[in-house]
Image: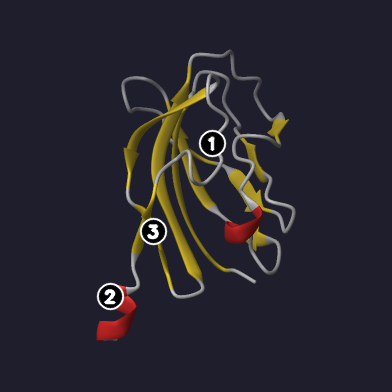
Amino acid sequence: QLQSYHDKKTLTPTDLGIRNGVWESIANNSYKTGKTIHLNMEIYTTATIVANYVYDNVFTIPSQYRPLNDTIVNAIASDGAYKNAVACTAMVKENGNLFICIPKATNNYLFIDAEWEIK
């Protein structure tokens, strides 16, 4: 347990391959311990959100942090006033792409929480 704590490495949005210029990080508590990645981040975009469109390039995760298997991700979207929150369908693929489908066009703030094992 103590060894895992000392092996903890903080990961920035850039480390995890966020698509800069489109998505911006507001808050981040992402890290790697051993062979486990913990992604916990709030991000937003000023781009127009298309409801129920599958965004497949929010993150392009570098090979050293990609999951062993396609992994379901917890994601919630809200508007700029942090109201009208909705659950999103989200997954991080073995190839490093993080897919998110946002069901409401007004919700451009995302809260993402995920954990996966790496190769």
Binning the other alpha carbons within 10 Å of mark 1 as few (below 14), some (14 to 19) or many (20 upward) gives: many
Binning the other alpha carbons within 10 Å of mark 3 as few (below 14), some (14 to 19) or many (20 upward) gives: some
Disc 2, SS: helix
Tell me whether the residue at label 3 lies in contact with that at label 1, contact meaning CB atoms closer than 8 angstroms: no
The answer for how far apart the CA atoms under marks 3 and 1 are is 14 Å
Q: In this view, does 7 lie to the left or right of 18?
A: left
| Of 22 and 52, the residue lying toward us | 22
Q: Given the image, on which type of amino acid does mark 3 rest?
A: Tyr
Q: Is residue 51 above or below residue 113?
A: above
User: Residue at image x 65%, y 72%?
Assistant: 119
Tell me whether the residue at label 3 lies in contact with that at label 2, contact meaning CB atoms closer than 8 angstroms: no
Circle on res. 31:
3
> Does label 1 or label 2 sit earlier along the sequence?
2
Tell me whether the residue at label 1 lies in contact with that at label 2, contact meaning CB atoms closer than 8 angstroms: no
Circle on res. 18:
1
> Does label 3 or label 1 sit earlier along the sequence?
1
Q: In this view, does 99 lie above or below 50?
A: below
x and y, in percent, of residue 56 in the image: 71, 37
The answer for how far apart the CA atoms under marks 3 and 2 are is 11 Å
x and y, in percent, of residue 15 in the image: 48, 45
In the rendered image, which residue does mark 2 sit on?
Answer: 5
Q: In this view, does 117 lie above or below 42?
A: below
Disc 1, SS: loop
x and y, in percent, of residue 16 in the image: 52, 46
